[in-house]
Image (cartoon, rainbow, N blue to C red):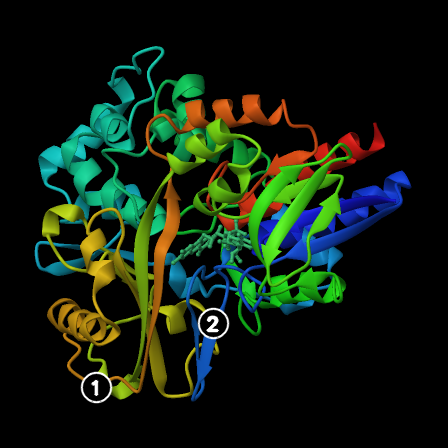
Amino acid sequence: MKQIAVIGAGISGLATAFQIEKKLKESGVSHKLFIFEKEKKTGGKIGAVYENGFRCEGGPNGFLDSKPSTIELCAELGLSNRLARSSDAAQRRFIYSAGKLHELPTNPFRFFRSDLLSLRGKLRIIGELWAPGPKQGTDPTIAEFARRRLGKEAHARLLDPMVAGVFAGDTERLSLASCFPRMVELEREYGSLIRAMIKLAKARKQNPGTGKHGGGPAGPGGKLTSFDKGLSVLPDAIAERFRGQIHLNADLKKIGMTSEGFRLSFSNAEDLDSDCVVVATPACDASSPLSFIDEGLATVLDRFEFAPATVVGLGFDRTMIDRDINGFGFLIPREENRRILGSLWTSSIFSHRAPEGSVLFRTIVGGARSPELAGLSEEETIQMVRSELKEIMGITAKPQFAHVFKWQKAICQYNVGHSVRLQEIDERLSRIPGLFLTGNSYRGIALNDCTLNAKRVADDVTNFLKD
Ligand SMILES: Cc1cc2nc3c(=O)[nH]c(=O)nc-3n(C[C@H](O)[C@H](O)[C@H](O)COP(=O)(O)OP(=O)(O)OC[C@H]3O[C@@H](n4cnc5c(N)ncnc54)[C@H](O)[C@@H]3O)c2cc1C
C-alpha cells in the first residue's frame, strides 16, 4: 500500500488530493492519502466572516468561469447547482483618476468620449498597431511591455491599476511572461494586441461556441463566480471527502529521506513515513522543511517575494450612500498617491453579501506599492479606509459592519527571473523522485490555476507510484 502526504489544505492541496485519489483509483494503485494543515481550518486563503447578515470574504472573491478547471471540479463534486455568477452590473469597472471615478469604456465610441486618457494617450493606444516587437531573449516587465505597446499613459492609468488589483504587485518588477503569458503569445502570433482582439472577436462571431467573454471592458473574459454560501463551499466539499484523513494544527517542520521514501515531522502530529509528498504550501513556507533534504532547493524557494495585503470589509446602510454603486468597484493608479489600491462593491457583484437595505465594500490596502500600510493596526486601517472612501466616494456614514483581514504574505510576486527560478526548482526536484511542489507561488496565482495544476500534479504522482 502506497502512502501519500499532501501538505497544506488550501485549494491547491485539497484539489490535488482530490485528483490524486481519483487517478489512483482509476489506475488500481492501492494507497492511503493524508492531508496535513498547520491552521485549525481548511481552505487556506479562502474564508469569510458572517456577521449580522454580512458575508465578507477575506481572500479570494471568486473565480472566472471562462476557464474550465474549477467549473469541472465543481461538477465532479456535485456543486454545479450551488454556483453563483456575478451580476451583469459587475461588468462596469471604474478607475479613480484626477479626483473622480471614470467608468471604463465598453466600446470604441465610449473610449473616445472617456476623459480617463488624454487625446494623445488615446491616439498612442491606436499606435499599438505599429509598435515595435520585443527584444529577443529578454524577460520584460509588464511596465516595459505596456509602455512599448500602449504608451506611458495607458500603462499608468490602465495597466498599473489592473495589475495592482490582480497581483497587488508592481508593474516595474513583475515579469510579463510569468504573469500574463497569453499577452506574449498574442503579440507573437498577431504582432499587435489590437489586431489580435479584432481577429479573435471575428472568430468568436463566426463560431460562437469558442471563448466566452463577459468580464466587461477591462475585465478578464468570463464571469466572476462563487457559490450560494460563499467560496468556502468548494474547499469544504473536498475536505468532507477526506474526513478522517485531514490533520489540522499539524505544522510540517521537516522532510527527511529514508531508504524507502520520506519521513515527515510535524508539530502536533506523529511522524509519518510516506512514498510520496506533495508540498502545497506557499513557497516561503516550503523552504524550511525542505532544507533538510536539499539546501539549494530551500535557497531558491527563499528567493520568492510576497506582497502583503489587508482586506477591509465595510458595510453601510444603503440610504447613506449618495452615489451610483452599480458596478464591480474601482482601482487606483499609483500616480494618484492614494493609500488604498481600490475597492470592490461586493454587494453589487454578488447577491446575499449584505442584508436587505445595506451594502458591502471590500477595500484593498498595501501590496507591493505600499507594504508599510499593511503594518497598521486594525483600528488605524479602518480609519484610513473610511477617510479614503470619504474623499473618493463621498461616504461619511458610520459603518454597520467592519472587519479587517491581514495577509502578511498575500500574493507571490512573479518578478523578473520567475521562470528561471521555476527551472531551477524543476531541475532539483528531478533528483528527488516522489517529491512534488504545487500552490499558487509557481504557475499561476488564481484559483483556476490552482485547480488546473492539481490535475497535472496528480498525473505526475500517479505515474511515479505506478512505476
Ligand atoms: C486578498 C486576496 C484576494 C484574492 N482574490 C482572488 C480572486 O478573487 N480570485 C482568484 O482566483 N484568486 C484570488 N486570490 C488568489 C487565491 O487566494 C489563491 O489562488 C488561492 O487561494 C491559493 O491557494 P493555495 O492552496 O495555493 O495557497 P493557500 O490558500 O495559501 O494555502 C496554503 C495552505 O498551506 C498551509 N501551510 C503552510 N505552511 C504549512 C506547514 N508548514 N504545514 C502544514 N500546512 C502549511 C497554510 O496554512 C494554508 O492553509 C486572492 C488572494 C488574496 C490574498
Which residue has dot 1 on it?
Answer: 398
- Looking at the image, which residue is at 66% across and 62% down? 247
Seen in the image, is 277 located left or right of residue 199? right
> Looking at the rendered structure, which numbered label has been put on residue 54?
none
In space, the residues marked 1 and 2 are separated at their CA atoms by: 22 Å
Q: Quadrant of the N terminus?
A: top right
User: x and y percent of residue 22 in the render?
Assistant: 80, 48
Secondary structure of residue under mark 2? strand
Image height check: is 121 above or below 361? above
User: x and y percent of residue 463 in the render?
Assistant: 78, 30
The 10 Å Cα crowd at callout 1, few under 14, some 14 to 19, many 20 or more, is few
Q: Nearer the viewer, residue 151 or 62?
A: 62
Q: Can residue 218 be seen at all in this image of the molecule?
A: no
Residue type at mark 1 is Lys
The 10 Å Cα crowd at callout 2, few under 14, some 14 to 19, many 20 or more, is some
Image height check: is 191 above or below 19? above
Q: Nearer the viewer, residue 347 or 277?
A: 277
User: x and y percent of residue 337 in the render?
Assistant: 10, 52
Residue type at mark 2 is Ala
Image height check: is 40 above or below 11? below
Residue at mark 1: C-beta within 8 A of ligand 1: no
> Looking at the rendered structure, which numbered label has been put on residue 48?
2
